[in-house]
Amino acid sequence: MDSISLNSIDIAFANAQYQRGNRIRISHFLSDDSARELKALVDTIPYYHQACFYDGQAQLIPPKKFSELDLKARQEFIKKIYVQAADATGFWYGRYQPEGAGALIYDQIKSWLESSVILDFVRAVTGHENLSKVTTQITCFKPGDFLTRHNDVVPVENRKVAYVLNLPNQWHPDWGGLLQFYTEHGQPLEAWSPEYNSFGLFDVSHPHSVTSVSQFSPQNRITISGWFHSD
């Protein structure tokens, strides 16, 4: 990951954009070679656990465990997930669980995000000078996957800024998987398509969702996302 480099970005301009709405999406974030290298690394991930909200708690289900359920049990499980989603509660998507030799992928990406290059960049753009820690997750939204409206405020974790680095190729907005922002009263405000090699930053207090990926989407929505925390 030492070879991953950013394109030239006007920090002052980016800071001004962020301050207008406490959010910014930067296109062409990484150099072309770096974007290809990072995507190739993530593409080696063999499988994702299923992240969901079920029976009142967040769960992360290994794919083998879910596949061992009989067809009726799987159908009932997913039906309950969708019933909850209709009441604006829950999520259903793939999340990489670092384990075994594959954990090196996660460690490399997390170390890069915690490097002075990235931390200094995010501090300068957002104005949060005391950012010191990064939480990282690699996610895969397949057709039908979603994340309902919420914010990312967790006071005990000192989350300040959420981020998302998009890796899908030539994503079409009709395929869904949009990062949708809302007003405090739930009115749609702005939506970001997961444009390849774009990097989004937004204040954790922003209500947002990831709209359901369309059943006709020809690819999955692969992203690296998480939060920058203060001391």
Image (cartoon, rainbow, N blue to C red):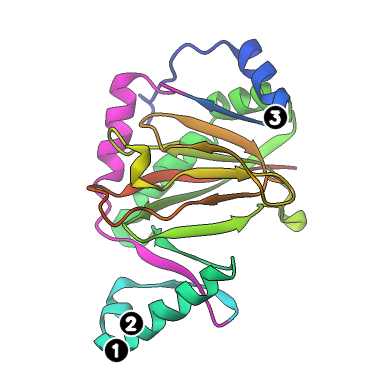
Q: Specify start and end residues of the magenta stretch as a single range.
A: 27-55
Residue 142, picture quadrant: bottom left
Residue 72: which numbered mark, if any? 1
Residue 47 magenta-drawn?
yes
Mark 1 and mark 3: Cα distance apart in space: 46 Å
Residue 182 seen from this side: yes
Residue 227 seen from this side: no
Does label 2 or label 3 sit earlier along the sequence? 3
Residue 90: x %, y % from top left: 54, 67
Q: Indicate the amino acid at tag 2.
A: Gln
Does label 1 or label 3 sit earlier along the sequence? 3
- Helix, strand or loop status at disc 3: helix
Decide: marks 2, 3 in contact (CB < 8 A)?
no
Residue at the disc numbered 2? 75
Residue 207: x %, y % from top left: 66, 49
Residue 41: x %, y % from top left: 28, 40
- Helix, strand or loop status at disc 2: helix
**Badge 2: residue crowd in 10 Å (few <14, some 14–19, many ≥20):** few
Q: Residue at x 52, y 13 (%)?
A: 9
Mark 1 and mark 2: Cα distance apart in space: 5 Å
Mark 2 and mark 3: Cα distance apart in space: 41 Å
Decide: marks 1, 2 in contact (CB < 8 A)?
yes
Q: Indicate the amino acid at tag 1.
A: Lys
Q: Is residue 116 above or below residue 44?
A: above
Q: Indicate the amino acid at tag 3.
A: Gly
Residue 176: x %, y % from top left: 39, 47
Give the camera-side residue of 127 and 23: 23
